[in-house]
């Protein structure tokens, strides 16, 4: 028996590590560097910043250190990429928590659960690369980093902007794809038989936290864009508005399967309650008709119990998020709007001050 345990233990530990293993190409790359994620992020930031200084030197921009417009536009790409690297460990942790949240409620043994995760969780790396490429091309076409007007020729810096824009939008595309792939896997877990208690939904809150974080990261990226490229035109405002809308949709769509499971569980419980209420009511009518009134107090108590239970079921939530999560999402969507408003006000006040007679 002891030898059997020694043989089985490593296999189980390998299967259990599936949720913590590197999932995306970015995670695998950082794992291969053997650096802590914070150091890897800092190294990426330096690696992106130094070529920018070199390009600016070749274009003679270092002689114009106070050209804020040039530096803001050029810094956008490396800052967003560094931002994606910095937030990625949280993506990984929340993905793991969302998957592990199903362990106590899914009607599978530990070994069956691990085998299910091992079969359906792994990411299609070629599709991730395709998402990166599509994001890079779409970003170039949409943002057109070569079209920014400059007072002097900046051939090297424009090339740097084009490269960093492609990398930035490619990473964004890859993050969106991996988010959708994880959501698809979680949808498969939702379709497994679940032992769900509608009065205790805390096991499902990690799914809501994951959706919220994806939405907040998208809105944070918009905020960075507004800081580094202020006073964007109508096209920029439309793009920002679309991204904010997508962020809100990601929050709710990421919990859609959980909502369906919770609503279905409530409806099933309500059907059981109403069947019992109908049975108690039928007993009440039959005993009254026969004049057997001695059991009426017991039947009345049972009726009240089922009615109270029905009320509690109706009041049970159908979404796994909390009021705090909704407030955080609402406040985050207001930040870009506030920044845009302040920028507009600042431009108006500056224009009036300059043109004042």
Image: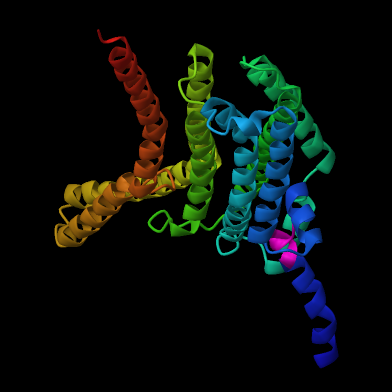
Residue occupying the point 38% across, 44% down: 328
User: Which residue ends up furthest to the bottom in the rendered image?
Assistant: 2
Q: Which residues are magenta?
A: 17-22
**Front residue of 300 and 20:** 20
Residue occupying the point 36% across, 32% down: 334
Residue occupying the point 49% across, 19% down: 232
Q: Is residue 1 visible?
A: no
Which quarter of the picture shows residue 70? top right
The answer to whether residue 20 is magenta is: yes
Q: Is residue 310 left or right of residue 257?
A: left
The answer to whether residue 300 is magenta is: no
**Front residue of 318 and 10:** 10
Check the image and report above or below for 298 versus 183: below
Q: Is residue 107 left or right of residue 310?
A: right
Check the image and report above or below for 220 versus 148: below
**Residue 278 image point, x, y percent:** 32, 45
**Front residue of 35 and 343:** 343
**Front residue of 177 and 39:** 39
Which quarter of the picture shows residue 333? top left
Q: Is residue 31 visible?
A: yes
Quarter placement of the C terminus:
top left
Residue occupying the point 48% across, 29% down: 226
**Residue 256 image point, x, y percent:** 52, 38
Quarter placement of the N terminus:
bottom right
**Residue 276 image point, x, y percent:** 35, 51
User: Which residue ends up furthest to the front in the rendered image?
Assistant: 63
Total numbered labels placed on residues in the image = 0
Which quarter of the picture shows residue 270? top left
- Magenta stretch mostly in which secondary structure? helix
Q: Is residue 57 left or right of residue 72?
A: right
**Residue 36 image point, x, y percent:** 68, 64
């Amino acid at each position: 028996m002891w030898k059997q345990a020694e043989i089985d233990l490593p296999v189980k530990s390998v299967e259990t590590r599936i949720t913590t293993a590197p999932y995306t190409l970015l995670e695998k790359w950082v794992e291969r560097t053997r650096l802590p994620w914070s150091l890897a992020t800092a190294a990426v930031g330096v690696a992106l910043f130094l070529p920018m200084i070199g390009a600016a030197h070749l274009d003679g921009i270092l002689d114009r250190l106070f050209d804020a417009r040039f530096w803001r536009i050029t810094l956008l790409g490396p800052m967003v990429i560094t931002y994606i690297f910095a937030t990625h460990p949280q993506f990984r942790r929340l993905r793991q928590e969302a998957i592990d949240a199903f362990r106590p409620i899914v009607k599978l043994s530990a070994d069956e659960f691990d085998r299910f995760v091992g079969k359906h969780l792994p990411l299609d790396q070629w599709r991730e690369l395709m998402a990166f490429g599509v994001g890079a091309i779409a970003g170039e076409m949409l943002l057109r980093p070569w079209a920014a007007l400059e007072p002097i020729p900046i051939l090297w810096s424009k090339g740097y902007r084009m490269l960093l824009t492609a990398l930035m939008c490619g990473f964004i595309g890859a993050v969106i794809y991996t988010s959708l792939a994880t959501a698809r896997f979680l949808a498969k877990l939702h379709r497994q038989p679940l032992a769900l208690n509608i009065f205790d939904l805390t096991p499902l809150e990690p799914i809501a936290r994951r959706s919220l974080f994806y939405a907040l990261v998208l809105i944070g990226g918009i905020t960075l864009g507004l800081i580094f490229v202020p006073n964007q035109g109508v096209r920029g405002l439309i793009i920002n508005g679309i991204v904010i809308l997508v962020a809100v949709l990601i929050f709710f769509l990421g919990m859609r399967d959980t909502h369906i499971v919770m609503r279905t569980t409530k409806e099933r419980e309500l059907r059981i309650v109403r069947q019992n209420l109908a049975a108690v009511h039928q007993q009440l009518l039959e005993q009254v008709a026969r004049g057997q009134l001695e059991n009426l107090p017991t039947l009345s108590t049972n009726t009240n119990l089922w009615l109270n239970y029905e009320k509690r079921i109706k009041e049970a939530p159908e979404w796994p998020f909390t009021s705090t999560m909704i407030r955080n999402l609402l406040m985050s969507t207001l930040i870009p709007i506030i920044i845009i408003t302040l920028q507009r006000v600042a431009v108006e006040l500056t224009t009036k001050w300059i043109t004042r007679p």
